[in-house]
Image (tube, rainbow, N blue to C red):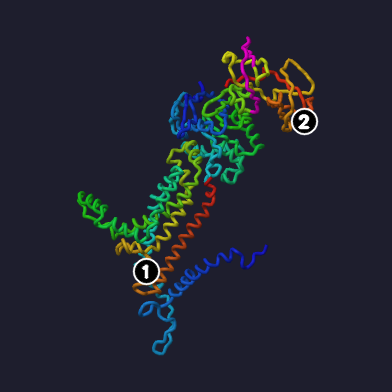
Amino acid sequence: MKTSFLSEKRVLSIPPLVYLICLFLIPTIFMIIIAFRVPGSYGGVAPIVEKINNHTQINFSLDSFKFTIDNQFIWQLFLRSLFFSALTTLICLLIGYPLALLIARSPRKYRDILLLLVIIPFWSSFLIRVYAWMIILGPQSGVSYAINFVLGTLGFAPINLLYSSFAVVACLVYINLPFMVLPLYANLEKHDIALIEASRDLGATKSESFWQITMPLSLPGILAGSGLVFIPCIGMFVVPELVGNNCSLMIGNLIKQQFLQTMNWPLGSVTSIIMTLLVLSVSLAVGLMFRRLGGLKYASK
Amino acid sequence: MPILEIQNVSKQFADHLIVNNVSLSIEKGEFFTLLGPSGCGKTTLLRMIAGLNIPDSGKIILEGQDITTMPPEDRPLHTIFQSYALFPHMTVFENVAFPLKMANWDKAKIHLQVEELLEDVQLTKFAKRYPHELSGGQRQRVAIARSLVDRPKLLLLDEPLSALDASLREHMHIELVKLQEETGITFVYVTHDQHEAMALSSRIAVMNFGEIEQLDLPQAVYTRPKTYFVADFLGKCNLLPAEILAKNDNNTLRLRVANYLEFDTSQDNADEFNVGQKGHFAIRPEKINANRQNQYDNLFSHSAKVKGYYYYGESTLYEFLINDEIKIQAMLSNSKNQTIKFFDEGDDVVISFDPHAGDFLAE
């Protein structure tokens, strides 16, 4: 049967297509063009064709790229973003894996409740949750008081938990944890218990059984969760701005600053493009690894 | 000394007593079968031997050593699971090598041993394949190779053939018996399939509601069932209400069956019964004969009407009615030498049987 030009599938795909073209593709093209333009004297960009003293000047340049590549400060921001994201992913994995395993191995009737508890933070706004952390880590909080009391008795100077790299990573971990737990749970829940029992029966201790069977079978879940945590972390700017200090700014903060405060749009565009490429390459790497794990799709019952 | 002894083992899940005070002992080199309907506790009993469940009370003793609470990895025995439980992320080779790797064998020795086992089950060519790339029968053989690779003292098999189709299953029956004889490893086999149990086992324990109803040789369990459940569960059986009228010498009971048929039946355990005791008279359909002529041998015979039949090919199962109320089934062979003609519904016949071929079963 010949599919008609206006088949159901095509008609249904029009709204998302229009949405993505208008709000993603066109702005991205704008951004790429702006990256090659010249910043305007009063912010934004200078006109492409400009007449100065009777001679016409075309305002296209690679200056913003050169500036970015030569600027150590920008690279430092990129590296820090990668580092914070990787650290956040690792901590989320270390906390999230046992949690997901615990939920997956709980009696069926408790699983939904436990999952609900993981999702509940989403019920309040992202900003409010960060503000809550500002209170938890603030100098007046019980946590700060307790830590500084211990440090004081050991003879160390008190520390400030809030406005630090520690606070940034702590917040990033808190906010992203559910994105690690949910895909891991979805994977672990499908594992056939008979495989664990068989491994024990064939001579594996509890920990050998975990490292030989459960862990390898959950690699797709680990990969999915890590991707879901790592990728949004790279572009994060709210968290470092609210709970970080000058030494914990990330690339998202620079981009925001270039567009909204310094008004250097071309520089903001260049850093945005690099960030987008970074995220794309990470997604690509995750995707490729997924493909290599193809055999594992038979892992579940 | 028996290789495995189970002493008064009980196991409860929530409010359900799954295994109730079971005791049995298995000799070295036996092909021992736990037979029963689903939920009778046979799998739980097997899992307790494997260490995957711990008994609430009682003891499990393997070669004189109490293993009741020993963790499964330390027990010198392996289980073949119903689903085979092959590790999907490991190749056939890695699957078979797993027990040796866990026992810290060195690599070269593992290689030799695994190669040998794969050769035994004719899977050498498939060593690098993953379980999902194999057929059901091949997976079964991987599971067998994996559980025999380190020569366990006991092999537990939990309905290992139930996922295979009928012809492959029959082929595997022969293979399993051969394997057991060749390796000399004691097999404990769990199944709900009576034919399988009778064809494979050296001894059968018939289980129901967490208890062993009868433990004996396959022929004995079939021909001399001790309880109503065993008679009913193993094959087809006519179970007619009966009452003991008198006890004669030489272990014979005078029975009144279905209110008015009266005959003597010999019974090994006649001493256990009393006059007036009620129960059932059990007789297998293949022990009952039928003909149109009145041939009264020294068998018990009675006129009957054909109520219906099921044609099975090699034999036909007839349902007869005596005096329009007592239902009796007869399995009549369709072999060439058989003079019996087909009966039709409503035909008048004479059915006959040797009362000594049946058994009185207490309530």
Is residue B337 positioned above or below B103 on the image?
above
| Crowd tier of the residue under label 1, counting other residues whose Cα lies within 10 Å: few below 14, some 14–19, many 20 or above | some
* Chain of the residue that carries numbered disc 2 in the rendered image: B
Q: Is residue A202 left or right of residue A178?
A: right
Is residue A64 positioned above or below A142 on the image?
below
Comparing B219 with B266, the one in front is B266
Q: Residue furthest bottom?
A: A54
Residue B331: name its quadrant.
top right
Foreground: disc 2 or disc 1: 2
Give the labeled residue for mark 1: A256
> At x 57% / y 46%, what residue is drawn?
B132
Q: Give the percent coordinates (x, y) of residue B353.
A: 71, 20
Q: Is the C-beta separation of discs 2 and 1 under 8 Å? A: no
| Crowd tier of the residue under label 2, counting other residues whose Cα lies within 10 Å: few below 14, some 14–19, many 20 or above | few
Task: Name the residue type under label 2.
Answer: Asp
Q: Give the percent coordinates (x, y) of residue B160.
A: 58, 36
Q: Main secondary structure of the magenta part?
A: strand
| Span shown in magenta | B235-255
Q: Could you confirm whether marks 2 and 1 are on the same chain?
A: no
Magenta stretch: includes residue B246: yes
Task: Name the residue type under label 1.
Answer: Lys
Q: Give the percent coordinates (x, y) of residue B49.
A: 49, 30
Which label was assigned to residue B12? none
Q: CA distance from mark 2 to mark 1?
A: 94 Å
Q: Is residue A115 left or right of residue B257?
A: left
Whether residue B155 is visible to the viewer of this picture, yes or no, is no
Which element type, helix, strand or loop, lies under badge 1? helix
Give the labeled residue for mark 2: B344
Magenta stretch: includes residue A152: no
